[in-house]
Image: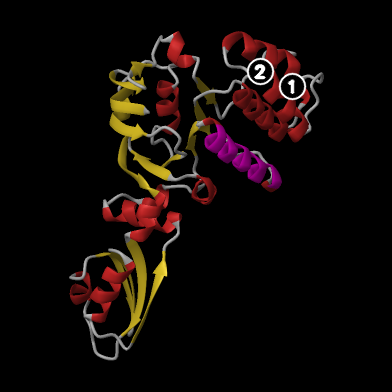
Amino acid sequence: MISINGVSKYYDTLKSLDGVSAEIKEGSIFGLVGSNGSGKSTLLRIMCGIFRPDGGEVLYDGENVYENVKVKDRVVYLSDDQFFLPSATLGDMAKMYASVYSSFSWDTYKKLVELFGLPRTRKISTFSKGMQKQSAILLGLSAKPKYLLCDETFDGLDPVMRQLVKRILADEVAENGLTPIIASHNLRELEDICDHIGLLHKGGILFESEIDTLKENIHTVQAVFAREIGIEEIARIGTVSIKQRGSMVTAVVRGTRDEVKTKIEGLDPDFYEIIPLTLEEIFISEMEERGYDYTKVVF
């Protein structure tokens, strides 16, 4: 398990992270999303021990990651900006990874090279952006880590390759107990693979939750009323947001489907329907409810 306890980080006078706390259970696939400049990359770099936090700590199974070689041997960080040794081939980088990670698997490496169809002896610097991203993923998985930290891992991959990487990650979780943490702006990508999600904004985590729990406890209702009904009356049923156009009302309401049904029927509409929210819509609602300008959040 990863325990993030009150982590703060400053760049001179700029506060990048402000007392971030979260727990990531072993074997889960945790998605980390947030607004631009929210501190996602900084948090990942602290989590893998590259940066030292100015406050708080990150523990892996009870051990601090910073300057701890034993813990770092179980953690692989896939940066958004891949680094490869100058003039290195895929084989050269594999040898480097094997010298650093005690669990590096040459069998896994050979299997993934064949699966991705990458040339082993060609210089990585001549690869396309997508091929370089594949190379980083391939090398990281070959290290057989217990924890895999991914920063915008799916960017630069074509749709077929994105699905392949998702399938590989899911298989590693099921078969080897891998725990991936995936930071991304793309909620639709995360919705496909993650079972837990955390929203980072202005240096702090607003909340973390299971995705299924999020979806079960918030819904959109569209209702038509023959009588005149005011926003204030609708708001009393516990709405997150309301839009009214003539007799048509669209409201985001907290509660299970049955609870929302009871609430809306209590207003005696002529017609209504309950619509599930996408993960993107849920996060926009959460940001809006907390008074943040969600138009600045890029998903």
Amino acid type at circle 1 is Ser
How far apart are the two marked residues, 2 and 1, measured between alpha carbons? 8 Å
> Which secondary structure lies at badge 2?
loop
On whether residue 202 falls in the magenta region, the answer is: no
The residue lying at 49 percent from left, 33 percent from top is 180
Relative to 83, say whether 230 is above or below: below
The quarter of the picture where residue 96 lies is top right
Q: Mark 1 and mark 2 in contact (Cβ < 8 Å)?
A: yes
Please tell me the numbered disc located at residue 295. Answer: none
Image side of residue 82 versus residue 270, left or right: right
| Earlier sequence position, callout 2 versus callout 1 | 2
The residue where tag 2 is placed is 84
Please say whether residue 219 is visible from this viewpoint. Answer: yes
What is the span of residues highlighted in magenta in the rendered image? 160-175
Amino acid type at circle 2 is Phe
> Which secondary structure lies at badge 1?
helix
Majority secondary structure of magenta residues: helix
Image side of residue 43 versus residue 148, left or right: left
Image side of residue 75 versus residue 25, left or right: right
The quarter of the picture where residue 224 lies is bottom left
The residue where tag 1 is placed is 125
- Circle 2 packing at 10 Å, graded few (<14), some (14-19), many (20+), is some
Residue 119 location, x and y as percent? 81, 25
Please say whether residue 152 is visible from this viewpoint. Answer: no
- Circle 1 packing at 10 Å, graded few (<14), some (14-19), many (20+), is some
Question: Foreground: 141 or 35?
Answer: 141
Relative to 105, say whether 31 is above or below: below
Residue 155 location, x and y as percent? 60, 39
Question: Foreground: 130 or 202?
Answer: 130
